[in-house]
Image (cartoon, rainbow, N blue to C red):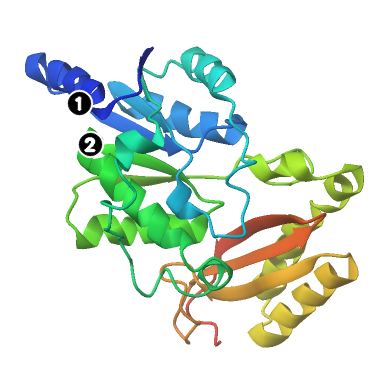
Amino acid sequence: MQIYKKKTDLKASLKKYRTYDSPKIGFVPTMGNLHQGHIKLVNAARAQNDIVVCSVFINPLQFEAHEDLDIYPRTLDEDIEKLSASQCDILYAPTNIDLYPESASFQTRVHVSGLSEGFCGNSRPQHFNGVATIVAKLFNLIGPDTAYFGLKDYQQFLVVKQLNLDLELGVEIVGVETFREITGLALSSRNRYLNKSGIKRAPLLFQTLKNLSEEILKGNRNYSEIEKKGSEILGNADFTVDYLAIRNALDLKPLVKDDSEIIILAAATINKTRLIDNVRFSISNNLSV
């Protein structure tokens, strides 16, 4: 696996590949601290592309002023081992100064209106601007054919898809299903902050969303009551619920009569650890809302 810390070296390497061939390039952007969920993305890229490029960059633009940028786990050596074992071809692990040369001179932010608002955008108003900005930069630097994103961060996935569409970046955006523990808990770098009690209770988030989806599949269309019920269940288990919402899975808008693609998405905190998750499913469009 080739490892580059400078974008000039990365671009030179990719240029060599493209000089002698027209390889299909798959890209997996990460912030490091890799777990099996990230490796699932790499495996998907490996199966569908000639060259797999992964980035490890803790993007400061994605963090709010009160968040844990300074304590975010930095595990590059372990990440390198995992990526090499997964047959990643190129790792780009830049410093801040390589992507944002001088903070005073880097003034551009990319904002995907609509999809960036609401849900995680309410409590983290700068987060998706940071995501869209770094993804646009990395797409421009790497020029991938395909890019892979986990569907646990579903709002982020839709933001990236819209960014790619609106700016005509020409990248196929592939969503990869969430990797879960046997308990149903979605893997996340933040799970390491959970204590024993939190680890025991955290799977209730996914279990609750699954149970609510089963109610809808059985014919219950009182969405506001279902949302209230889910929030109460989590609140009674000592979760602090940021949001729990039932929406159209295609655009996160409120459901209307003929919508058939549904998502229940939620963010909730336990043990001072913020967890997000979702359940997506289809219903017959002849059922009334």
Asked whether the residues under the numbered discs 2 and 1 touch, taking CB atoms below 8 Å apart as contact, a structural biologist would say yes
Mark number for residue 99? none
Q: Height in image: 88 above or below 219?
A: above
Quadrant of the rendered image containing residue 139: top left
Q: Height in image: 50 above or below 225?
A: above
Quarter in which the N terminus is drawn: top left
Query: In the rendered image, which residue does mark 1 sit on?
Result: 11
- Which residue is at a point 43% across and 31% down the rendered structure image? 44
Q: Amino acid at mark 1?
A: Lys
Query: In the rendered image, which residue does mark 2 sit on?
Result: 141
Quarter in which the C terminus is drawn: bottom right
Residue 280 percent location from the top left of the image: 56, 61
Left or right, 126 with reference to 139: right
- Which residue is at a point 44% across and 36% down the rendered structure image? 57
Q: Is residue 221 visible?
A: no
Left or right, 54 with reference to 266: left
Mark 1, other Cα within 10 Å: few <14 / some 14–19 / many ≥20: some
Residue 74 percent location from the top left of the image: 58, 30
Q: Amino acid at mark 2?
A: Leu
Quadrant of the rendered image containing residue 174: top left
Q: Is residue 151 visible?
A: yes
Q: Height in image: 265 above or below 187?
A: below
Residue 17 percent location from the top left of the image: 17, 17
Q: Nearer the viewer, residue 130 or 219?
A: 130
